[in-house]
Image (spheres, rainbow, N blue to C red):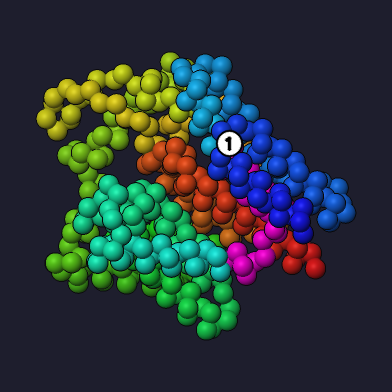
């Protein structure tokens, strides 16, 4: 018990206070030894662990060609901590299914109330947002992406639940969390949730529900299209397909083109982690006005273009191997129905935003993906 507590405290301290990877790796080794002695069995390395190691090595190679090694080292440490932290926690406290599920249900409810209370009552200060978009006091993209990610997980629990009373509660919570995602006014989050819902229904073989949901959605859109509260959201959704005049869409296309140009100049190892902004000296042309302008974008606004530009084809392949390892391990443990929807949402959101540059998002995302594979393992064994 005391060793358990000591390792937990050291882990938290190193995650919060240390830049270097040595303390966190030392604690990881300590927790592996602790769990090995506790279970009295050989240390098992799953496909997800191998994938993690390959990915970290692959993106770490970009240091060889990094424009600014200090910036790369700082962000590399963040990625390592984000990926190793859930493994350390799991080694100390194995995830029981019910506690893991309850934790994310409670987290979704708290996030939803944070956003809704801000939007309607301004109880939480805005952090870069305005009254047209909620951010939960935490930044628009952090908030909208994390809550959309968690909302799909909760909705999946609702679909898979058998007990009627629990199912009703999960349904109400799902509606609440999805409503908060809608209020974030983030188009990519909307798309992710909609597509995530269909993925859940497909993998659970709910074909009738897909038809009912599609019909209901069309009826609601037609009947409420002129409603003063609904109309702004419909107008916002229409801009998703506007590739000629919408500034947000055109801006992303220009940034992605620049990222691809950076990748072509450094195709093998890229310009180094967290160095997109240093490599970007592009002169942009506003397609709506035809005017030239120069702007420093801190990221490629896409995980994939960012990976290609900053870590080259080696880092990008390492990322794909890590995802494949997660999915294969989930398949081995019969947990595909749990991991596929949230993994899809995560990968989809990565098209439009550099989420791996957002520290908290990476922690939440990887904690869920890794933990889904491992939670309830001891219960299954028993």
- Residue 6 seen anywhere in this rendered image of the structure: yes
259 in relation to 212, above or below: above
Q: Residue at x 24, y 66 (%)?
A: 120
Residue with the most extreme left position? 289
Q: Main secondary structure of the magenta part?
A: helix
Residue 88 colored magenta?
Answer: yes
Residue with the most extreme right position? 40
Q: Which percent across, then down, holds residue 144?
A: 37, 54
| Element at label 1 | loop
192 sits to left or right of 273? left
Quarter of the image with the C terminus in it: bottom right
281 in relation to 167, above or below: above
Q: Residue at x 45, y 28 (%)?
A: 274
187 in relation to 379, above or below: above
Number of marks present in the image shown: 1
The one of 319 and 272 positioned closer to us in this rendering: 272
117 sits to left or right of 157? left
> In the rendered image, which quarter is residue 301 located in?
top left
158 sits to left or right of 128? right
Magenta stretch: give its range. Answer: 79-101
Q: Which percent across, then down, holds residue 313?
A: 53, 25
Q: Which percent across, then down, holds residue 97?
A: 65, 66
40 sits to left or right of 117? right
Query: Which residue was labeled with disc 1?
Result: 18
- Disc 1 packing (10 Å; few <14; some 14–19; many ≥20): some
Q: Residue at x 82, y 50 (%)?
A: 36
Q: Residue at x 28, y 67 (%)?
A: 218
The one of 39 and 217 positioned closer to us in this rendering: 39
Residue 55 colored magenta?
Answer: no
């Amino acid at each position: 018990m005391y060793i358990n507590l000591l390792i937990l405290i050291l882990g938290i301290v190193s995650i919060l206070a240390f830049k270097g990877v040595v303390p966190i790796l030392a604690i990881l080794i300590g927790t592996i030894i602790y769990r090995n002695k506790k279970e009295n069995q050989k240390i098992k390395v799953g496909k997800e662990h191998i994938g993690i190691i390959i990915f970290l090595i692959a993106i770490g190679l970009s240091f060889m060609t990094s424009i600014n090694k200090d910036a790369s080292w700082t962000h590399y440490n963040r990625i390592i901590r984000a990926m190793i932290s859930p493994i350390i926690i799991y080694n100390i406290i194995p995830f029981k299914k019910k506690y893991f599920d309850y934790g994310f249900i409670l987290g979704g409810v708290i996030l939803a109330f944070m956003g809704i209370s801000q939007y309607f009552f301004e109880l939480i200060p805005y952090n870069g947002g305005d009254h047209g978009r909620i951010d939960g006091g935490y930044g628009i993209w952090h908030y909208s992406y994390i809550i959309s990610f968690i909302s799909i997980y909760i909705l999946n629990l609702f679909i898979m639940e058998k007990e009627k009373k629990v199912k009703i509660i999960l349904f109400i919570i799902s509606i609440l969390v999805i409503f908060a995602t809608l209020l974030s006014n983030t188009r990519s989050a909307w798309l992710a949730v909609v597509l995530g819902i269909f993925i859940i229904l497909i993998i659970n073989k709910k074909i009738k529900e897909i038809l009912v949901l599609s019909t209901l959605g069309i009826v609601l859109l037609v009947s409420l299209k002129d409603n003063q509260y609904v109309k702004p959201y419909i107008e916002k959704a229409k801009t998703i397909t506007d590739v000629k005049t919408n500034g947000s869409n055109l801006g992303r296309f220009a940034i992605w083109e620049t990222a691809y140009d950076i990748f072509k100049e450094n195709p093998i190892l890229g310009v180094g982690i967290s160095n997109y902004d240093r490599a970007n000296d592009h002169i942009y042309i506003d397609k709506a006005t035809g005017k030239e302008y120069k702007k420093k974008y801190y990221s490629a606004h896409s995980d994939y273009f960012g990976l290609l530009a900053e870590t080259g084809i080696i880092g990008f392949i390492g990322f794909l191997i890590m995802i494949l390892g997660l999915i294969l391990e989930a398949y081995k443990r019969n947990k595909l129905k749990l991991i596929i929807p949230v993994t899809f949402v995560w990968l989809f959101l990565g098209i439009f935003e550099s989420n791996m540059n957002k520290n908290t998002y990476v922690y939440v995302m990887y904690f869920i993906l890794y933990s889904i594979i491992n939670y309830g393992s001891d219960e299954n064994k028993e």
